[in-house]
Image (cartoon, rainbow, N blue to C red):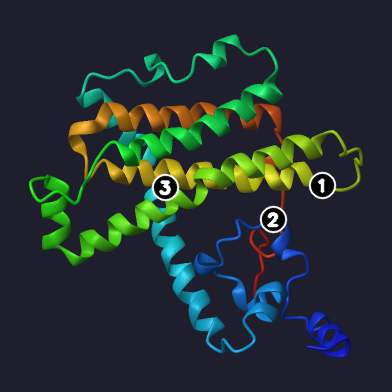
């Protein structure tokens, strides 16, 4: 593509200016690929973008419906098991750390290992496991389990990366007239935390016997979310181009 063609594409009103600045880079699950110039340039021969977007929108809509009842379900499940969510110890460094910047970074980084430890701790492929039986007898269960795993794995490292960008950028955000870039990055991280919490909650369907371990991870993410929201209170309000705008019509 030459310079003139690129300029012409960039001037096309169907493309949302700057949409790629505050996305989670998960193009395969994005519902705005047909309106993202970066993606279009990289997929010049991919002619079915609109169909892809619709499919992705349906995926996240279904997952969003799950998120609405996640916390209530968690509380009910914990009460059934006699577990006090607030009493679960999640991270000793939270008590030791005096600097919120370092605490946030440390917790996000530790979460990467928590995820690895979880997936290393079970082998669902064993034929004598309940999970293996469920997956081999239900195609729907396979799809659901794969979706859950993909979500957890995708945001596993990205939460840390986005929070680091937000924390680093916070020191250079001085304008009161424009939204802070750090808030935009933090919002992407918070969305990743939200979706990860929902995915871990859904994991309970496959591992009801490991509820304490799962609740510990979920509670850990809830604490991290609270810290980020206190550190960057305007992050949730940040309007990302395309994603958070009221009218996304072409």
Badge 3 element? helix
Q: Is residue 69 visible?
A: no
Tag of residue 179: 1
Nearest to N terminus: mark 2 or mark 1: 2
Q: Residue at x 37, y 26 (%)?
A: 216
Cα–Cα span, label 3 and label 2:
21 Å
Q: Quadrant of the N terminus?
A: bottom right
Of labels 2 and 1, the one closer to you = 2
> Which numbered disc, 3 or 2, marks the residue closer to the eye?
2
Mark 3 or mark 2: name the one nearer the start of the chain.
Answer: 2
Please provide percent x and percent y for residue 70.
Answer: 37, 41
Residue that numbered label 3 is attached to = 67
Residue denoted by label 2:
22
Q: CA distance from mark 2 to mark 1?
A: 12 Å
Q: Nearer the viewer, residue 229 or 49?
A: 49
For label 1, the crowd category at 10 Å Cα-Cα, with few meaning under 14, some 14 to 19 and many 20 or more, is some
Q: Is residue 55 above or below residue 219?
A: below
Of callouts 1 and 3, the N-terminal one: 3
């Amino acid at each position: 593509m030459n310079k003139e063609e690129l300029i012409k594409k960039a001037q096309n009103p169907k493309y949302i200016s700057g949409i790629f600045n505050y996305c989670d880079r998960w193009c395969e699950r994005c519902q705005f690929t047909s309106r993202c110039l970066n993606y279009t340039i990289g997929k010049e021969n991919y002619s079915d973008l609109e169909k892809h977007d619709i499919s992705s929108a349906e995926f996240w809509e279904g997952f969003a419906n799950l998120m609405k009842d996640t916390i209530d379900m968690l509380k009910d499940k914990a009460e059934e098991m006699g577990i006090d969510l607030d009493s679960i110890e999640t991270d000793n460094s939270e008590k030791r750390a005096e600097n919120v910047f370092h605490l946030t970074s440390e917790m996000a980084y530790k979460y990467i290992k928590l995820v690895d430890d979880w997936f290393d701790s079970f082998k669902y492929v064993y034929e004598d496991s309940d999970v293996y039986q469920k997956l081999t007898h239900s195609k729907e269960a396979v799809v659901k389990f794969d979706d859950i795993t993909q979500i957890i794995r995708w945001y596993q490292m990205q939460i840390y990366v986005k929070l680091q960008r937000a924390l680093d950028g916070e020191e250079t955000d001085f304008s009161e007239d424009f939204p802070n870039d750090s808030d935009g990055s933090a919002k992407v991280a918070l969305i990743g935390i939200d979706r990860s919490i929902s995915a871990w909650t859904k994991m309970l369907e496959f591992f009801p016997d490991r509820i304490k371990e799962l609740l510990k991870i979920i509670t850990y993410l809830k604490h991290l979310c609270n810290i980020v929201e206190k550190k960057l209170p305007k992050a949730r309000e940040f309007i990302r181009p395309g994603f958070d705008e009221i009218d996304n019509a072409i």
